[in-house]
């Protein structure tokens, strides 16, 4: 699922760790893994990766003694299995804090999906639960949201860096934004190629 803000009408400095609250339900199984990615999108549709986060819904119990305004920490002391069709609240932080200037005319984009099931040397990824459609709810009673660490009054002291020059912040040019979903393709190789460019 994709969510994008309107373009910023003035600069906004982010300094700290965003907190994501999701109201989630599953169609089948008893667990779900979530991958959340925050990106900056320029007026020319250039997408800059800011940070991501991973979390397993059954480990949603918060360690209140360790959690503060900078980071949500989970106890991992017990699992709370999900029940199909029931909505549960999951709070999480991204993997690490960010320091980023959202420039005038840029948007923020949040993508919520499942982690890649292909093993990676840095992130263990054994899928949880059964095959399922996972649903993110957003209403007055189920207010899914992201809380951004905005630093009031901070302004840019330099021009924006050239595309592709920020360490560990890959960019992607083009691509079509599909609110709430992913771009569909009739051809799998087209979809794979779009992800690689």
Image: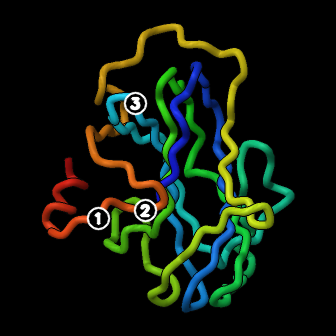
Q: Please give left or right for residue 62 compared with residue 182 in the image.
A: right
Q: How crowded is mark 3: few (under 14 residues within 10 Å), some or many (20 or more)?
A: some
Q: In which quarter of the image is residue 186?
A: bottom left
Per the image, label 1 sits on a secondary structure element best described as loop
Q: Please give left or right for residue 30 compared with residue 182 in the image.
A: right
Q: Distance between the residues labelled 1 and 2?
A: 9 Å
Residue 184: mark in rendering: 1
Question: Residue 140's spot in the image, x, y percent?
Answer: 78, 61
Marks 1/3 in contact by CB < 8 Å: the verdict is no
Counting residues from the start of the chain, the first of labels 3 and 2 encountered is 3
Counting residues from the start of the chain, the first of labels 1 and 3 encountered is 3
Front tag of 1 and 3: 1
x 86%, y 57%: residue: 65
Per the image, label 3 sits on a secondary structure element best described as loop
Of residues 73 and 84, which is closer to you in this image? Answer: 84
The residue furthest right is 65
Q: Is residue 139 above or below residue 163?
A: below
Marks 1/2 in contact by CB < 8 Å: the verdict is yes
Question: Residue 144's spot in the image, x, y percent?
Answer: 68, 59
x 51%, y 39%: residue: 108
Q: Mark 3 points at which residue?
A: 42
Q: How far apart are marks 1 and 3 (CA)?
A: 22 Å
Q: Please give left or right for residue 65 compared with residue 97 in the image.
A: right
Q: Name the residue under label 2.
A: 181
Marks 3/2 in contact by CB < 8 Å: the verdict is no
Q: How crowded is mark 1: few (under 14 residues within 10 Å), some or many (20 or more)?
A: few
Of residues 187 and 72, which is closer to you in this image? Answer: 187
x 72%, y 54%: residue: 72
x 52%, y 51%: residue: 3
Per the image, label 2 sits on a secondary structure element best described as loop
Q: In which quarter of the image is residue 178?
A: bottom left
């Amino acid at each position: 699922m994709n969510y994008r803000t309107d373009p910023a009408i003035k600069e906004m400095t982010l300094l700290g760790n965003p907190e994501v609250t999701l109201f989630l339900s599953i169609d089948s199984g008893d667990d779900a893994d979530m991958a959340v990615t925050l990106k900056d999108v320029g007026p020319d549709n250039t997408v800059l990766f800011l940070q991501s986060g991973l979390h397993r819904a059954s480990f949603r119990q918060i360690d209140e003694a360790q959690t503060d305004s900078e980071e949500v920490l989970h106890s991992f002391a017990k699992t709370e299995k999900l029940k199909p069709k029931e909505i549960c609240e999951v709070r999480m932080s991204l993997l690490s804090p960010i320091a980023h200037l959202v420039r005038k005319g840029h948007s923020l984009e949040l993508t919520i999906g499942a982690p890649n099931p292909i093993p990676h040397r840095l992130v263990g990824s054994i899928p949880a639960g059964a095959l399922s459609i996972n649903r993110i709810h957003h209403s007055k009673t189920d207010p899914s949201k992201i809380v951004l660490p905005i630093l009031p009054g901070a302004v840019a002291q330099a021009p924006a860096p050239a595309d592709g020059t920020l360490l560990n912040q890959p960019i992607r040019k083009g691509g079509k934004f599909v609110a709430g979903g992913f771009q569909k393709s009739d051809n799998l190789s087209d979809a794979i190629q779009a992800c690689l460019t």
